[in-house]
């Protein structure tokens, strides 16, 4: 649970540490604004992905289902700076499917936590395997990290791509190729 009082105290100390006056007109409400922002940006810490994926429907289709270009925003746990991009999820049902919005909601649950992209990719895939129980799943995330573009190496536009394969996708080059072909369309 987000403790907004502690965040407000921390932001006040941060402002003072930067040599600012937290009581000046432009900053007086900043600690409260930042506390509310982090409550929103980290709401996934309070959510259970199983709730999103628990409603499934019987389906005869056992062919690949792909939901691509799911926009996500997250916060890097190393620098507390945003990273954002697109998630692409494919799975092969085993007699049941979930509503396509549930895949996007699952991305949102995990993205709304302090994260690293590598872990985020695996958590999405593992949740789908656990709750939907498909024959396999493949998840790819492409993201721009503000900790790379605004500070440090300062390389705007660079993309980090992570990929996780589970189940029948793990060692099936044909399924993997189909996934990448569909992404390119």
Image (tube, rainbow, N blue to C red):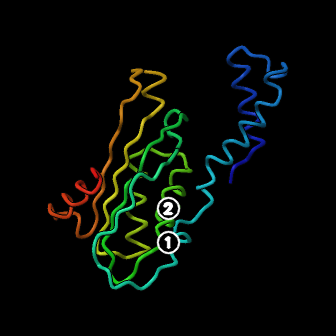
Q: Residue reaching furthest top? A: 19
Mark 2 packing: few (<14 Cα in 10 Å), some, or many (20+)?
Answer: many
Left or right of residue 11, residue 26 in this image: right
Q: Nearer the viewer, residue 69 or 48?
A: 69
Q: Which percent across, then down, holds residue 25?
A: 85, 20
Q: Nearer the viewer, residue 65 or 143?
A: 65
Residue positioned 63% across, 59% down in the render: 46
Task: Tell me the quarter of the picture where residue 127 sits.
Answer: bottom left
Vertical comparison of 98 with 48: above or below = below
Q: Are marks 1 and 2 in contact (CB under 8 Å)?
A: yes
Left or right of residue 115, residue 129 in this image: left
Q: Residue reaching furthest left? A: 173
Q: Residue reaching furthest front? A: 185
Q: Nearer the viewer, residue 138 or 166?
A: 138
Mark 1 packing: few (<14 Cα in 10 Å), some, or many (20+)?
Answer: many
| Label placed on residue 53 | 1
Residue positioned 69% across, 41% down in the render: 37
- Mark 1 or mark 2: which comes first in sequence? 1
| Label placed on residue 165 | none
Vertical comparison of 161 with 87: above or below = above
| Label placed on residue 106 | 2
Q: How many numbered circles are shown?
A: 2
Picture quarter with the N terminus: bottom right
Task: Tell me the quarter of the picture where residue 143 sits.
Answer: top left
Left or right of residue 116, residue 10 in this image: right
Q: Which percent across, then down, holds residue 132?
A: 41, 75
Residue positioned 25% across, 59% down in the render: 179
Instruction: Give the CA distance from mark 1 to mark 2.
Output: 7 Å
Residue positioned 52% across, 44% down in the render: 74
Q: Which secondary structure, mark 2? A: helix
Q: Which percent across, then down, holds residue 7?
A: 72, 39
Q: Which secondary structure, mark 1? A: helix
């Amino acid at each position: 649970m987000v403790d907004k009082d502690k965040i407000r105290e921390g932001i006040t100390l941060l402002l003072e540490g930067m040599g600012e006056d937290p009581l000046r007109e432009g900053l007086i409400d900043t600690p409260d604004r930042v506390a509310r922002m982090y409550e929103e940006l980290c709401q996934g810490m309070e959510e259970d992905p199983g709730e999103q994926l628990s409603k499934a429907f019987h389906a005869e289709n056992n062919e690949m289902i792909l939901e691509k270009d799911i926009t996500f925003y997250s916060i890097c746990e190393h620098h507390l700076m945003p990273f954002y991009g697109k998630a692409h999820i494919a799975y092969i049902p085993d007699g049941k499917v979930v509503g396509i919005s549930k895949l996007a909601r699952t991305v949102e649950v995990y993205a709304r936590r302090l994260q690293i992209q590598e872990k985020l990719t695996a958590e999405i895939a593992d949740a789908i395997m656990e709750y939907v129980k498909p024959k396999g799943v493949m998840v790819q995330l492409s993201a721009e990290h503000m900790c790379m573009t605004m500070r440090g190496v300062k390389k705007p536009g660079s993309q980090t791509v992570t990929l996780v394969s589970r189940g029948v996708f793990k060692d099936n080059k044909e399924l993997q190729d189909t996934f990448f072909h569909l992404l390119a369309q």
